[in-house]
Amino acid sequence: MSTASKKATKRIFLVNRDFQLRYMRSSVLVGIVSTALTSLLILYPLYEFKIIRIAQFLPTPVMVAMVLAALANVLFVAYMTIFFTHRVAGPMFALVRQMRIVEEGSLNAILHTRDSDEMKYVTRNFNAMVDALRHQTEADIAKLDRVVEELEDLARKGQSPASIDDARGLLQSFKQRMERKIV
């Protein structure tokens, strides 16, 4: 397997550790509490009505198996929480990264979605917003081109060349800044 294909298949499940670990802790706590409550609700009535005796009915190997099963349950809940929050945290992380690109002035940000992403709607709307901003900027550049052409026509006709040159310079610098946003 080449380095490029290894990079493509590499998965980082903790893309936003604070977010994912916070939900994992909550899920594990819910798993522990629900396991304890379920065990209590099942075993307590059986013990209270003397249907079973813990010392006779549940020998040490069975108790150890129950504790190991509870631990396996907690680990499974923790893994599944990380796995499912990755489907939300990954696209959120990518969205924030692309928003920073737009914030810096570039309108070339684009989000790619995976089939398993839970935020396809947000991704589509972000891409549509950036595309609309890009088209609006291109339209503004076209308007500036027309203004510059009109100023050059006025300059050729000999009308107020000093102020026209100043205006042309300002418009050209503004146009260049606008072009940098979409390039």
Image: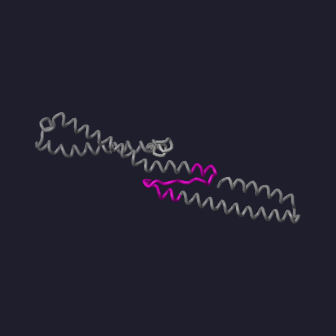
The extreme left residue here reads 50
The extreme right residue here reads 158
Quarter of the figure with residue 29 = top left
Q: Residue at x 87, y 62 (%)?
A: 160
The quarter of the image holding the C terminus is: bottom right
Q: Is residue 36 above or below residue 149?
A: above
Q: Residue at x 22, y 43 (%)?
A: 39
| 77 relative position to 168: left or right | left
Q: Is residue 160 above or below residue 173?
A: below
Q: Residue at x 16, y 45 (%)?
A: 45
Q: Position of residue 25 (x, y in %)?
A: 38, 42
| 12 relative position to 134: left or right | left
Q: Position of residue 139 (x, y in %)?
A: 67, 63
Quarter of the figure with residue 181 = bottom right
Give the magenta part as a residue range: 99-125
Per the image, is 108 magenta?
yes
Q: Is residue 58 above or below residue 110?
A: above
Q: Position of residue 153 (x, y in %)?
A: 83, 65
The extreme top residue here reads 60
Q: Is residue 67 above or below residue 136?
A: above
| 115 relative position to 27: left or right | right
